[in-house]
Amino acid sequence: MSATHLRPTTRPVAAGIFQGSGPQTLLVGTRCTSCASLYFPQSLSCRNPQCQDKKIEQALFGQRGRLYSYTVQAYRPPPLFQMDDWAPYALGLVELPEGLRVMAMLTGCPAADLRIGMEMELTTEALYRDADGNAVLTYKYRPVSDSQNAP
């Protein structure tokens, strides 16, 4: 067995949900080619009842947005949801410039410091390690640091 097979790697928690990692992460969604409705995660067709065409194309979203709402997940989810070192975490709804709102785990600051309207940026973090030691990544939003907002 080669050394590359022994080294742990990373993989997304679900195929086709995001591309890239860290600050280069983009969410993979869809856009209707007729009515311009946006969907995340990807949709097989347009779900807008007024749309006649229903054809979609892949669209990338998400590097920056604003915190629209949030809550703290204080109970442990069922075993289907895996997370190493589980602890209560913030879960937010982030409004993207395209008008789409995306639900995501929040990271990078205590829940007490979160504020509606704060600028957020997309990143990835390990959710857990699988049986082979591979980091299973999920997308998360974190507050944009003040230094990144400076003129």
Image (cartoon, rainbow, N blue to C red):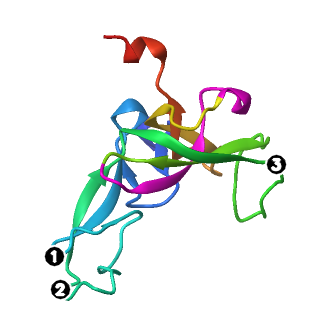
Q: Is residue 45 left or right of residue 73?
A: left
Quadrant position of residue 114:
top right
Q: Are marks 1 and 2 in contact (CB under 8 Å)?
A: yes
| Mark seen at residue 74 | 3
Which residue appears farthest toward the right when viewing the image? 75
Magenta highlight range: 98-113
Amino acid type indicated by mark 3: Ala
Q: Residue at x 24, y 63 (%)?
A: 58
131 part of magenta stretch: no
- Judging from the image, what secondary structure is the residue with disc 3 in? loop
Quadrant position of residue 3:
top left
Pick whichever, 116 or 102, lies toward us. 116
How far apart are labels 1 and 3 at the CA level? 41 Å
Quadrant position of residue 106:
top right
Q: Residue at x 78, y 64 (%)?
A: 78
Residue wearing tag 1 = 34
Amino acid type indicated by mark 2: Asp
Label 2 crowding class (10 Å Cα cut-off): few <14, some 14-19, many 20+? Answer: few
Percent x, y of residue 40 = 40, 62
Mark nearer the N terminus (3 vs 2): 2
Residue wearing tag 2 = 53
104 part of magenta stretch: yes
User: Do we see residue 30 in this rendering?
Assistant: yes
Foreground disc of the pair 1, 3: 1
Mark nearer the N terminus (1 vs 3): 1
User: Do we see residue 136 in this rendering?
Assistant: no
Label 3 crowding class (10 Å Cα cut-off): few <14, some 14-19, many 20+? Answer: few
Q: Residue at x 20, y 89 (%)?
A: 52
Quadrant (top left/top right/bottom left/bottom right) for the C terminus: top left
